[in-house]
Amino acid sequence: MMNTSEQSSPYLSSVDVARILDVNVATVKRWTEAGKLDCVKTAGGHRKFLMRHLAAFAIEHQKYAQHLPLIHFGSELNLDLNAELLRGEFKELIPFFLEKAILCDSTIIQNILNSLYMVHHDLVLIYDDLITPVLHEIGSKWERGELSITEEHLASQTIKDAIIKMQDIVVKPEIRTEKVFVLTFSEELHDIPAKMVQHLLEVRGFQVLYSGQRTPAGDTSSVFESFHPERVYVSSVFVENAQQSQAEFRELLGLCQVNKAELFVGGSGINQLRIKEDDQLHRLWTFKDVMQS
Ligand code: B12
């Protein structure tokens, strides 16, 4: 069965693949039958391809690599990093991405994110397995005094900008009816996870109202009156004053109850609040949970 992200991804036909690799359609068929070129088969028996199938083929058959938009890491094509990127394993990619973020190399950062998306069509993989560990490492470097506050700002802002720009190439369903409100509490400056939550919900087909940083959560009744969101997602990373956040949370939950909206909360800041899950309130942990919520 196809997963949600694959359902919305643009598959290539055998004709498209033949055109890209500059061979006959019959050759494409022969390669797939010989197991050289992977594909998925539709219910009707047609072969469909994703960029990652072509990319895996090109890694094995170098002659065809020139036909594909394999990523150039700096001045040259690094096949080891490309192979990792294609497999969706990030052992070498994480330190590389971290280094480039610290150097504010927005071109390479953007290139990697866009390529990863084009190959895997899976934002969860990118957010949970690449961006989250890199941001954590940036935080650790700052804690150890290896990065100044300004350097930490520059690196995280470079990543945030690339995440926002990547959204342009992400495939979203055209008809979006159900509305979702995404916010952080009023003391919160960390809005990168909330941005990622927004993007995942858009991929799922929701129309997202995103208020981001420093939203006075208890004072959002006008949002419910004007837009009638059916769901609300809160990301909380840093809680400075637990009492204040608890009060905001309580008021927001009250608004959700009155307006029959489900409330989903995530992030390490939530650990500092007293919450009781029920039919209306859900504690989420990872971006994967956002896709399944
Ligand atoms: C970038 C950053 C900043 C940037 C934020 C820029 C921006 N626009 O977001 C700036 C420079 C503004 C900043 C400011 C501060 N920061 Co800061 N920051 C970070 C950093 C490096 C990355 C944060 C981030 O985006 N992480 C990526 C997310 C995805 O990871 P995560 O938060 O762990 O989230 C995971 C889960 O919690 C979950 N999740 C999160 N939200 C949601 C929501 C839903 C619905 C779901 C399902 C899941 C989910 O998803 C992730 C999956 O594993 C972290 C380091 C770190 N360890 O994260 C420090 C960090 C969070 N910051 C910290 C601190 C102390 C501060 C400041 C107080 C510094 C200061 N003295 O001024 C201020 C606080 C400002 C405020 N009031 O909010 C501490 C927090 C410690 C704590 N928990 O008490 C950290 C951990 C750094 C550290 N090692 O000490 N920061």
Image: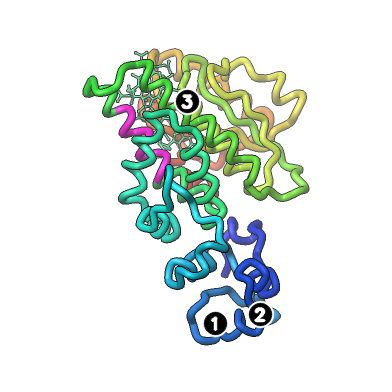
Q: Which residues are magenta?
A: 130-139
**Residue drawn at (51%, 43%), measured in percent from left and top?**
111
Say left or right for 28 vs 102. right
**Residue drawn at (52%, 15%), measured in percent from left and top?**
186
Between marks 2 and 1, how big is the CA–CA gap?
A: 11 Å
Question: Dot 1 surroundings within 10 Å: few (below 14), some, or many (20 or more)?
Answer: some
Rendering coords of residue 261 (x, y %): 64, 35
Q: Nearer the viewer, residue 269 or 197?
A: 197
Q: Nearer the viewer, residue 233 or 149?
A: 149
Q: Are marks 2 and 1 in contact (CB under 8 Å)?
A: no
Give the residue at mark 1.
31
Disc 3 CB within 8 Å of nearest ligand 1 atom = yes
Give the residue at mark 2.
24
What amino acid is labelled 1 in the image? Trp
For mark 2, give the secondary structure. loop
- Front tag of 2 and 3: 2
What amino acid is labelled 3 in the image? Gln
Confirm whether residue 171 shows in the render.
yes
Question: Dot 3 surroundings within 10 Å: few (below 14), some, or many (20 or more)?
Answer: some
Between marks 2 and 3, how big is the CA–CA gap?
A: 46 Å
| Number of marks in picture | 3
